[in-house]
Amino acid sequence: MQKKTIAGFALLLTIAALLVFVYISFMGTEYLMEGNHLVAILLVLMGAAFLSYSIWVMCTSKASRDKRKGLPKEVASFAVAIIVLLVGSVAFTQFLYVHDHQQQLRETLFSTADEVSRIDSVYKDYAQHRVRAYNKLLKKEKYPSAKQSLLTKSLRRRLMPEEYDTICAERQRWLMALHDASVWNISTPRNLHYIVTAGQDWTEQYRQVSSIIYKGEKAEPFGSGETLFIPGEEYKQFSQPHRPDLRSLAATIVCCLLILTTYLHVRRPRSRYAGSHR
């Protein structure tokens, strides 16, 4: 009875430790996958499935009567469990890194959002400057007033369509609605990724809109010759994997030892009538 109690306690402790390990690895995977929930969930579920199956094979093989057939399966399954945990330690380390640099994460998120929020105003200044310069060119070339007005309005509509102000307002509302950059918030890595890609996408959209140069203009597309938005190294540090440190390796070793402890409490039957936990 006492042996069964100890075996049950070892099993519960193993399950609890593995659940914590899997959860932290999942949070780290979110950052590695840049907030792609579906991919992160699938990867973690696959890892958890391989791990659970390996432990199940270890215990059920030992509970069988044939040691010669069971022992190789048990060794191989334990090796698979170790490999899965080592792979998971990379994601585990990622979250530890994010947790250690959570203040930097907040600063990166909000500074990036602030930088991206300026893209619209910078483009507006660019567009207005081009329209004024083009209007001066037309006057210098002594175009008729009606022609000047028509061409100037044409360039303004091309650079700043009617829905321009509405789009800018929606973008600003979206940036203001972002959640707090908490390391425990599953949306934080996705928000950070969305802000960075939004900055790149908006800049490219403006470049395409302004790429048509009217006759006589001495102008270049928006952002030519300079990069208006470059994701900082701080952002990359949160999405690139880091080498496992002592804490993640220690957590992996503890999980391996607990799995081994659970396995050792499974008794191999000495006869076909013997139970698996005697």
Image (tube, helix red, strand yellow):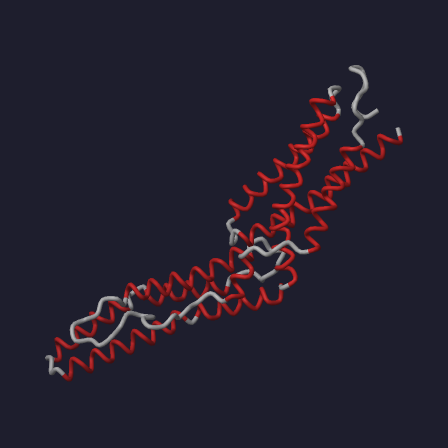
- Up-down: is 153 above or below 68? below
Image quadrant holding the C terminus, namely top right
Q: Which image quarter: residue 14?
A: top right
For residue 120, side relative to residue 80 (left or right) = left
- Nearest the camera: 188 or 152? 188
Q: Position of residue 236 (x, y in %)?
A: 52, 61
- Percent of width and height locating residue 259: 74, 38
Q: Nearer the viewer, residue 277 or 162?
A: 277
Left or right? Give the position of 188 relative to 258. Answer: left
Vertical relation: 276 (above or below) 149: above
Residue 162, how many percent across, how many down?
A: 29, 65
- Residue sitting at x 61%, y 45%: 87
In the rendered view, tell whether residue 242 sits above or below residue 219: above
* Residue drawn at 40 percent across, 62 percent down: 200
The quadrant in which residue 47 appears is top right
Residue nearest the viewer, comparing 170 with 271: 271
Residue under the point 81% across and 33% down: 7
Residue at the farthest right position: 2
Instruction: Provide residue 21's location: percent of width, then percent of height.
Output: 68, 46
Q: Which image quarter holds the N terminus?
A: top right
Number of numbered labels in the structure image: 0
